[in-house]
Image (cartoon, grey):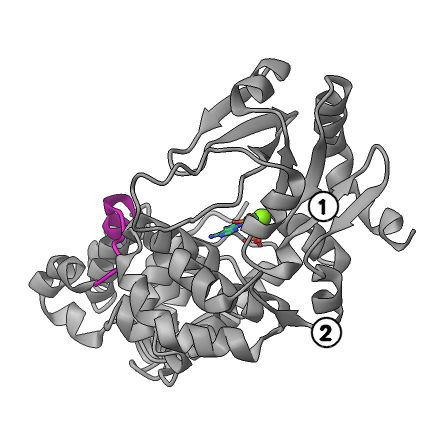
Amino acid sequence: MKFKNIFTHSSLLQASTIIKTLKDNGFKAYFVGGCLRDLYLGVTPKDIDVTTDAKPTEIKKLFKRAYIIGKRFQLVHVYVKNHLLEVATFRQLGEENIENENFNHNIFGTVEEDAFRRDFTLNALYYDPTTDEFLDFCKGVDDLDSKIIKSIGDPEIRFQEDPLRIIRAIRLSAKLNFSISEDDTNAILKFNHLLTQIPSARIFEEFIKFSKTTNLFLILKMLEDFNIKNILCKNINSTDDEIIKIFTENTNNRIKDNKPLNPAFMFAVLLWQEKIISSSKSLTSFSSSLGSLNIPKKITAVMHVIWANQKRFSFTKGKRPFKLLRQPLFRASLDFYELRVKSGLLDNNNLKWWLTFVEENTDNK
Ligand code: ATP
Ligand code: MG
C-alpha cells in the first residue's frame, strides 16, 4: 500500500513502540493528525500524536514516564527515550461549545467519532503501524491531493464551536501552501469576531507556533486579509512595513539552517514602534494595549530588554559599549538593531562600528 512506505519514516519508528504496547494490552491505537498529514506531504512532522481507546489512567499505567496533563482535554505525555508523544483517548461526538464551561471534553468515544471531532479533513487520518491499517473517514487524502483545507462538517458550526480553528486554518494554509475552501473562507469572515472570546493563552500558543513556521509573512498577510489582525491586536506591525518583510525572510532562512528561534524576538519585532525608544513609559505600558494577545511576563521581560538596549547602541565611547557587550541579551539586541538598520529606520554607520567592535572583542576560539 502507498502509505506503508511513507509511514515507516524514521520519526514514527520509535513512536511505534507505544502503539505496540497499547495494542499488546488489548487496546486500539493509531498515529493521528498532523504527523500523518506532514509525512504524506514529505514534511518531517514537528510532533507525533497517538490516539487510543485506553483511558488516560490506563495509558499512564502502561508507561514508565507518562504524565496526565490538560484540563480542557486530558492527554498523556509519554516519553520514549528523549521523544515526547502526546497520547489522547478517542473523543466522543457531542455539542461542543467553547463557551459552555460545563461541557465535558473527556467523554470518550470510538475512533470514528474521534475523527469527526477533529478540525480539518486532512487532520483526521489514522494509521496503525502494527497492522498497516489506514483510516480516512473524512476523505482527508482527497483534500491533501487537492491542496485544500476544509473543515469536517459545516465550517460555520465548527468555527463557532472553537474559533481558534480559524487561526489554525490560516497557519496550516501558510505552512503547507494550501488554499482554504470557499465555504471555510466565508465562515471565517463571518465568525472572525468570535476570536475575542478565546482564552488569551490559546491565542498565545498559536503565536508561538507562528514563530517557528516558515511563511510567517503569509500568516500575517492572511490575518490582515481576514480582518483578524485588528481583532487580535491592533498594534501588530503591518506587512507593508519593511521590518516585517526582512524579519520574516530571516526567519525562513533560520528555519532552513536549523538555527534556534526565539519567540520573544518575534514579538519584539511584531510590536516594535520607533517611538518606543524615546519613552521608557511606552516600554512597559504597551502590554495593556495588546487586546486578545496576552504575552506572558517571561517573554515581555526579554522584549523589554531588547528594546531598552536599542538606545544603548548610540554610545560608542568609553566603557559603555563593553558593558552592553556583556549583557546576556546583547546578541539578540544587536540582531534587532541590525534589523532596524536594514529596514531603513536607521543609518548604517553605527552598525558598522558595532560589528567591528564585536569582532575585535569576541573570543571566537
Ligand atoms: P502542527 O503540529 O503542525 O502545529 P497539528 O495539526 O499536528 O499541526 P496539533 O496542535 O499538534 O496540530 O494537533 C494535533 C491534532 O489534533 C490535529 O491534527 C487535529 O486533528 C487535532 N486538533 C488540534 N486542535 C484542534 C481543535 N481546535 N479542534 C479540533 N481538532 C483539533
Ligand atoms: Mg502536531
Name the residue at 53% across, 40% down.
92
Q: Is residue 40 above or below residue 214?
A: above
The type of residue carrying mark 1 is Tyr
Using the rendered image of the protein, determine whether residue 341 is visible from the camera's viewpoint.
yes
Residue 159 image-quadrant placement:
bottom left
Which residue is the site of mark 2?
Answer: 146
On screen, residue 19 versus residue 245, left or right, reads right
Task: Identify which amino acid the numbered label 2 is placed on.
Answer: Ser
Q: Residue at x 20, y 56 (%)?
A: 320
Give neighbour class at mark 1: few <14, some 14-19, many 20+ (Cα, 10 Å).
many
Q: Is residue 126 left or right of residue 103?
A: right
Q: Residue furthest right?
A: 1
> Residue 70's quadrant in the figure?
top left
Nearer the observer, 179 or 205: 179
- Is there any visible trace of residue 357 in the rendered image? no
Give above or below for 76 relative to 319: above
Q: Residues within 10 Å of mark 2 (few under 14, many from 20)?
A: few
In the rendered image, residue 14, in percent from the top left (x then y), is placed at 74, 32
Viewer-nearest residue: 274 or 157: 157
In x, y percent, where is residue 110? 63, 37
Left or right: residue 239 versus residue 216 is: left
| Mark 1 secondary-structure assignment | strand
Point out residue 113 in the picture as x, y percentages from the top left corner: 60, 44
Residue at the location (62% across, 29% down)?
Answer: 82
Location of residue 292 by image quarter: bottom left
354 falls in the magenta region = no
Q: What's the magenta region?
A: 291-302
Q: Which residue is label 1 attached to?
A: 126
